[in-house]
Image (cartoon, rainbow, N blue to C red):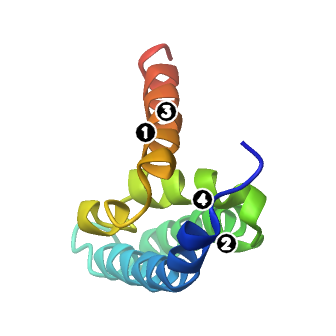
């Protein structure tokens, strides 16, 4: 599939902004958990924090550093798979788009099961 319907594209653009905000909130929560680990000293927490930020930076680059209609289906699937968009939000897209999203997620999950 080379892209999504115009009607779905119009829905995707504001939803992408919500997904980015949710990604940031997930990152803040993860950072908060790391810095409040009472069983580790400050140096260990610093290195854990560094690892979290590096991992999340890589994720944000993969998820958000492109924006095009041709990548929208995989973006929606990634956002949904990571909990960045909700089921109710996914349901606003056309049946065709939802089917494509579910195909990607099924493929990824099958791939995870084989590792």
Pick the residue in front: 26 or 47: 26
Residue 82, disc: none
Disc number for residue 64: 2
Percent position (x, y) of residue 12?
54, 74
Evaluate if marks 4 and 1 touch, with contact meaning CB atoms under 8 Å apart.
Answer: no
Query: Where's the N terminus, which quadrant?
Result: top right
Residue 103: mark in rendering: 3
Query: Which mark is first along the chain, 2 or 3?
Result: 2
Q: Please name the residue that numbered disc 4 is placed on.
A: 75
Q: Secondary structure at mark 1?
A: helix
First in sequence: mark 4 vs mark 2: 2
Q: Residues within 10 Å of mark 1 (few under 14, many from 20)?
A: some
Distance between the Cα atoms at labels 3 and 4? 13 Å
Cα separation between marks 4 and 1: 12 Å
Label 2: few (<14), some or many (≥20) within 10 Å?
some
User: Residue 75 in the image: x percent, y percent?
Assistant: 60, 59
Rounded to the nearest angstrom, the CA distance separating label 1 from label 3 is 4 Å
90 is higher (above) or lower (below) than 35: above
The residue lying at 72 percent from left, 55 percent from top is: 3
Instruction: Reply above or below: 3 against 29.
Output: above
């Amino acid at each position: 599939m080379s892209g999504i319907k115009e009607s779905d594209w119009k829905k995707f653009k504001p939803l992408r902004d919500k997904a980015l905000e949710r990604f940031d909130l997930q990152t803040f929560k993860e950072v908060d958990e790391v810095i409040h680990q009472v069983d580790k000293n400050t140096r260990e927490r610093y290195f854990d924090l560094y690892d979290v930020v590096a991992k999340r930076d890589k994720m944000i680059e993969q998820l958000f550093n492109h924006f095009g209609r041709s990548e929208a289906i995989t973006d929606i699937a990634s956002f949904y798979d990571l909990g960045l968009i909700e089921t109710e939000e996914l349901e606003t897209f056309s049946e065709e788009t939802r089917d494509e999203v579910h195909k990607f997620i099924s493929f990824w999950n099958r791939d995870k099961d084989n590792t």
